[in-house]
Image (cartoon, rainbow, N blue to C red):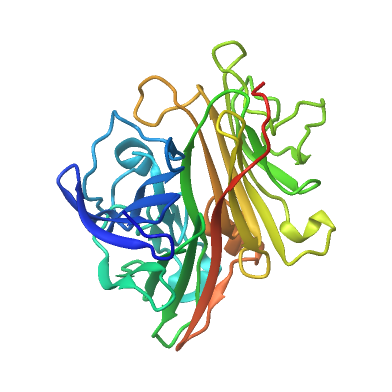
């Protein structure tokens, strides 16, 4: 068990796979380097723990191949990294030397073994693990460091994308955390942020290509309240930042997005520096969709993102794809917090 002023990181196994458990007095997470650095557990609490991540018991953990479908074969839950595109796509003619390059579904980072470069506890008592992956679709190296605070319920995620080549390349990135839900939870997003709906099922309160201003739709449906899909019509919808997080008008350098759990009086919060991570995406799946053809899931994917489209092809066509110049790198970072809230009654 971690001491009051130190976090720990220890080897463990998850379903036969080598993993690491990071832990302090009030937060723990489990990371599997063999599965693309997947975070398979994020638990808060001391005496009674809360697991924040959704898990799909119908799909087993296995190594991914470039031709695999994430949604059909690897949608196991937890937290994955999506890079350099979420949707599978072929880059258009004006992508220069990369024209015609095919990018796989949900990118090429998930489900592949990552190199472990350093693991330990730093001089401040924070547990850390740094993992790297040399990419095959783009000539680059992706690096992520996780740090667990010694005394607070805070995880830091630090990224570096290195381009050792002689050509600039475009990319998009998002974190893909699948969160488990209960009716009455509240989805937290910056008020007045505008979101574009790229997909919606027929029963959804939004329609494909509609733009909504958070949290309510044009017909006054409150998207922030997690519904009861057993009592209401199930639906699914994908929403992405219409422009970027600076549209909220409060002038802040940091934006919060997350999930409020009135059953445990806790909040899961992503603290995003908008100059580095300017976008957010939501996959609302309220018993309306499952990629493996089984019973539709009840979950939420809340994605901090660089790039506000489902595919890199779309960003290139818009002229808004982020890039990494030759012989250089791009870095970004953010934090995940678990915070206690005042006593509230679940709706």
How many numbered circles does the render carry? 0
Quadrant for residue 277, please give it. bottom right
Of all residues shown, which one is farthest toward the top? Answer: 231
Q: In this view, does 28 lie above or below 184?
A: below
Query: Who's the residue at 44% across and 26% down the image?
Result: 297
Image quarter in which the C terminus is found: top right
Query: Who's the residue at 44% across and 71% down the image?
Result: 98
Residue 136 in the image, given as x and y percentages of width and height: 31, 68
Of all residues shown, which one is farthest toward the left? Answer: 16
Q: Quick check: can you spot residue 115?
A: yes
Of all residues shown, which one is farthest toward the right? Answer: 249
Name the foreground residue: 171 vs 229: 229
Name the foreground residue: 219 vs 95: 219
Q: Quick check: can you spot residue 106?
A: no
Quadrant for residue 199, please give it. top right
Residue 123 in the image, given as x and y percentages of width and height: 40, 79
Query: Who's the residue at 52% across and 76% down the image?
Result: 331
Quick check: 270 left or right of 64? right
Q: In this view, does 38 lie above or below 221?
A: below
Residue 94 in the image, given as x and y percentages of width and height: 55, 69
Q: Is residue 117 above or below residue 205?
A: below
Quadrant for residue 90, please give it. bottom left
Quick check: 267 left or right of 12? right
Residue 131 in the image, given as x and y percentages of width and height: 32, 68
Query: Who's the residue at 42% across and 44% down the image?
Result: 43
Name the foreground residue: 230 vs 254: 254
Quick check: 340 left or right of 6? right
């Amino acid at each position: 068990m971690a001491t009051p002023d130190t976090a720990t990181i220890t080897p463990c196994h998850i379903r036969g796979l080598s993993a690491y458990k990071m832990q302090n007095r009030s937060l723990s997470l489990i990371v599997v380097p063999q599965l693309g650095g997947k975070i398979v557990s994020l638990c808060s609490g001391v005496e009674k723990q809360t697991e924040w991540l959704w898990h799909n018991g119908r799909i087993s953990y296995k190594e991914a191949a470039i031709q695999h479908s994430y949604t059909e074969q690897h949608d196991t839950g937890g937290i994955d990294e999506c890079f350099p595109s979420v949707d599978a796509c072929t880059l258009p003619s004006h992508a220069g030397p990369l024209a015609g390059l095919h990018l796989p579904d949900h990118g090429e980072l998930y489900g592949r073994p990552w190199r472990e470069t350093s693991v330990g506890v730093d001089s401040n008592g924070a547990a850390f693990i740094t993992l790297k992956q040399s990419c095959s679709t783009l000539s680059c190296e992706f690096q992520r460091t996780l740090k667990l605070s010694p005394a607070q319920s805070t995880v830091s995620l630090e990224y570096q994308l290195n381009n050792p080549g002689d050509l600039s390349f475009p990319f998009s990135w998002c974190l893909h955390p699948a969160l488990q839900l209960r009716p009455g939870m509240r989805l937290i997003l910056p008020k007045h942020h505008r979101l574009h709906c790229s997909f919606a099922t027929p029963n959804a309160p939004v329609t494909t290509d509609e733009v909504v201003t958070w949290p309510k739709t044009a017909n006054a449906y409150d998207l922030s309240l997690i519904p009861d899909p057993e009592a209401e019509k199930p639906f699914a919808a994908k929403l992405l930042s219409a422009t970027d997080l600076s549209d909220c008008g409060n002038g802040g350098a940091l934006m919060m997005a997350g999930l409020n759990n009135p059953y445990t009086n806790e909040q899961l919060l992503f603290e995003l520096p908008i100059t580095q991570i300017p976008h957010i995406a939501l996959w609302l799946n309220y018993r309306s969709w499952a990629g493996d053809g089984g019973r539709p899931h009840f979950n939420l994917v809340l994605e901090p993102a660089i790039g506000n489209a489902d595919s890199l092809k779309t960003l290139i066509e818009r002229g808004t794809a982020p890039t990494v110049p030759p012989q250089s790198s791009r870095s970004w970072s953010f934090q995940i917090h678990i915070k206690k809230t005042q006593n509230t009654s679940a709706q």
